[in-house]
Amino acid sequence: MINVNTRNISPEVAGTDKQLGLVFNDKKWIEYRRKWDENPKQGIVEKVPLQIDLFAVDICNLKCPMCPRQAFIPGKGYMDTKSIKRILDQGAEHGLCAFNFSGLGEPTLHPDVLEIIRYAKEKGVVDVNMHTNGTRLGAEFNKKLLESGLDRLIVSLDSADKQRYESIRIGASFEKVYAGVEDLIKQRNDHKSARLHIKANFIEMDEKDDTEKNKFITYWKGKVDRIAVLRYLDCKDVERLFWKENYVQDNDFCCPELWRRLIILSDGTATLCPRDMQKHHIIGNVNDKTISEIWTGEKIQKIRDMHRKGCFKELGFCADCPDSYDKKKDEQKK
Ligand code: SF4
């Protein structure tokens, strides 16, 4: 069997999405995560992706330096609710497992964000998840969010230090966002039926030691359900995508995402993967084709074949993908 790399690039504290099936006591979730691991290894292409990542929202209220928005200008609005529901209908027809509602902007700024989450749950999607910068979290919104049925919320909190946080999340108030998340945790804990799983993301900057990271983990451990540590990617400086001196490229890399998820941008364009926001590899458009036609189509299949043959470096866009790098062994020990 081909060596497909399914490692998680972000070292995480407290559990994995796979283990959540046991926490939720949800057989469908366990099966969906089994496919998440196994489909890339076995080259299984379902009728629709396991997860649709809908980058439906282009607008944002912050100006973070690592955001792709600093490198290029996405659209200026968001996908309309009718189109989003059509995508969900097409996915649900073939048992879509997961729906990530995100964007090149802040998804909670979509006027129908709660209705969209509710709709996805009504359609039977097992894992409805969303990334947020947390600026919209507050008592009233949190109550509705819990009622919507959202399964997972990933909040970019980045630092437990006000100054550091506000220098990364430019335009956000540390106190407001932290209070919003803590209120959400409290309401979730008091809520009888909500199973919302909350993950806090920390971002590694160009720091010489782990002081900031440890401070963050100490602050959130035992409050949120999970903590992830992400690499800082400077989107304006592609040569410095991350500190390569600490990483080594895996020449046998085969990208698992090609068997897992489909990325759809706000104008309906389907692109190769979450890194391809500038449409280097367009594999279809939901305005012309169904989700199933795009996912099982010739364009993406050719790219899968290249990866399975070990030729990912011949695909210019994938050649230097951060996912193909791993921390050097001596770095991992630290
Ligand atoms: S750039 Fe290529 S290797 Fe990297 S995540 Fe996208 S498809 Fe996978």
Image (cartoon, rainbow, N blue to C red):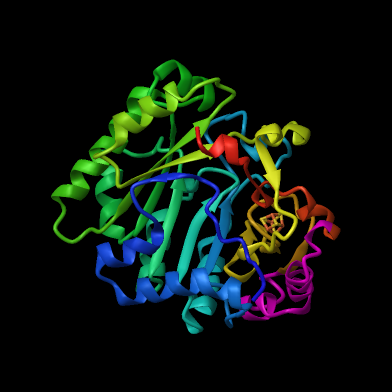
Quarter holding residue 26? bottom left
Residue in the image at 72% along x and 49% along y: 321
Q: What is the chief secondary structure element of the magenta stretch?
A: helix
Q: Nearer the viewer, residue 218 or 277?
A: 218
Magenta segment: does it hold 180? no
Closer to us: 126 or 93: 126
Relative placement, left or right, of 127 versus 48 is: left
- Can residue 81 be seen from the camera position used here? yes
Q: Is residue 330 above or below residue 96?
A: above
Residue 79, image x and y in percent? 58, 57
Question: Is 308 covered by the magenta stretch?
Answer: yes
Say whether residue 108 is visible: no
Q: Position of residue 42 (x, y in %)?
A: 60, 78
Tell me the residue at 31%/76% (across/down). Answer: 27
Res 234 quadrant in image: top right
Q: Is residue 243 left or right of residue 331?
A: right
Residue range highlighted in magenta: 285-313
- Which quadrant: the N terminus? bottom right
Residue occupying the point 38% across, 50% down = 153
- In this rendering, is residue 171 above or below 331? above
In the image, farthest residue toward the top: 163
Residue closest to the eye, 203 or 98: 203
Q: Is residue 7 above or below residue 291?
A: above
**224 left or right, relative to 7:** left
